[in-house]
C-alpha cells in the first residue's frame, strides 16, 4: 500500500500523521480534544510517534505495579489496562477511528491492531501471537513485544498500541508491565540486522489501514494537531 491524496469525502479518508518524538501529556490532551471535537464526517486518523520516557497508568492501574519509577514521570491515563512504559525507540500508534462508521466492535478493533502487529513482525521473520486474556502481542518464548490500551467515547477510539523496536529496555525493570509479571522484549533483540523505526512504522501502518478497511491513506508530517 502506498499513501495517496485524500478523498473529497473526509469520512472515507484515513490520515496517518508522523509526529516524531513527543511528550506524553501533550499528546494525551490532543487525543481527547480530537475525539471531543470530531463529527460523523471527520476523517479517521492514526498518529505515529515516539514518546519521551514516561510510565502511564491505565484506568485499572495499580500503584503497586510501579516498582521504582526513579526519575521517570508517572502519568495517569484514561485508557484501558494497567501500567506501561513509553520511550524513544518504541513505536506508539494512536488509532483514532469512528467504530460506528466502520461497523466495528471494540473486540474487532483489538483484533485488527494485534493482527497488524503480528503481520509486521512476520516481515522480519519473528513469529508472534496475541492472547485473548491479556491483550498485546507475544513472541513464541512468551515474552511480550507490544502492548495496547484503548478508550472508546462517542463510538470512537483513541489511545492505541506500543511496539518495542529498538529502545532502552532498562525502565521495564522498574515496573510490573501490565500487571502480568511478564518479561518484555523488542525487535532489535530478535533479529540479526535490526531495522529502524521508519520501515517498521511503514509496514505497521499498512497493515493497520488494511485491517480497518482502507486501501489508501493520506500522510501528514505536521504536528499541528498537538498545538
Image: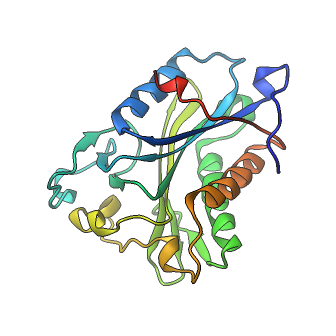
**In the figure, residue 218 lies in which quadrant?**
top right
Write the residue at 34% across / 44% down: 58
Q: Position of residue 211 (x, y in %)?
A: 74, 50
Write the residue at 57% across / 81% down: 191
Q: Position of residue 157 (x, y in %)?
A: 56, 34
Q: Position of residue 208 (x, y in %)?
A: 69, 50
Q: Position of residue 216 (x, y in %)?
A: 82, 41
Q: Nearer the viewer, residue 192 or 29?
A: 192
**In the figure, residue 222 lies in which quadrant?**
top right
Q: Is residue 28 left or right of residue 109?
A: left
48 is higher (above) or lower (below) than 82: above
Q: Nearer the viewer, residue 215 or 189?
A: 189
Q: Nearer the viewer, residue 165 or 58?
A: 165
Q: How is the image coloured?
A: rainbow
152 is higher (above) or lower (below) than 106: above
Write the residue at 61% across / 53% down: 113
Write the residue at 54% across / 23% down: 224
Badge count: 0
128 is higher (above) or lower (below) than 219: below
Amino acid at each position: 500500500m502506498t499513501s495517496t491524496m485524500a478523498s473529497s469525502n473526509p469520512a472515507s479518508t484515513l490520515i496517518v500523521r508522523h509526529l516524531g518524538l513527543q511528550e506524553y501529556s501533550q499528546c494525551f490532551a490532543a487525543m481527547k480534544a480530537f475525539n471531543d471535537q470530531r463529527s460523523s464526517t471527520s476523517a479517521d486518523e492514526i498518529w505515529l510517534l515516539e514518546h519521551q520516557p514516561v510510565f502511564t497508568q491505565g484506568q485499572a492501574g495499580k500503584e503497586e505495579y510501579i516498582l521504582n519509577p526513579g526519575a521517570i514521570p508517572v502519568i495517569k491515563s484514561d485508557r484501558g489496562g494497567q501500567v506501561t512504559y513509553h520511550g524513544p525507540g518504541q513505536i506508539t500508534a494512536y488509532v483514532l477511528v469512528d467504530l460506528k462508521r466502520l461497523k466495528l466492535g471494540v473486540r474487532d478493533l483489538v483484533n485488527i491492531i494485534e493482527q497488524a502487529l503480528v503481520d509486521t513482525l512476520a516481515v522480519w521473520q519473528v513469529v508472534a501471537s496475541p492472547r485473548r486474556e491479556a491483550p498485546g502481542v507475544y513472541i513464541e518464548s512468551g515474552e511480550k513485544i507490544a502492548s495496547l490500551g484503548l478508550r472508546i467515547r462517542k463510538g470512537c477510539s483513541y489511545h492505541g498500541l506500543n511496539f518495542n523496536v529498538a529502545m532502552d529496555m532498562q525502565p521495564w525493570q522498574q515496573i510490573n508491565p501490565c500487571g502480568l509479571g511478564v518479561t518484555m522484549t523488542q525487535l532489535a533483540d530478535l533479529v540479526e540486522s535490526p531495522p529502524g523505526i521508519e520501515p517498521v512504522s511503514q509496514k505497521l501502518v499498512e497493515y493497520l489501514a488494511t485491517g480497518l478497511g482502507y486501501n489508501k491513506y493520506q500522510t501528514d508530517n505536521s504536528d499541528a494537531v498537538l498545538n
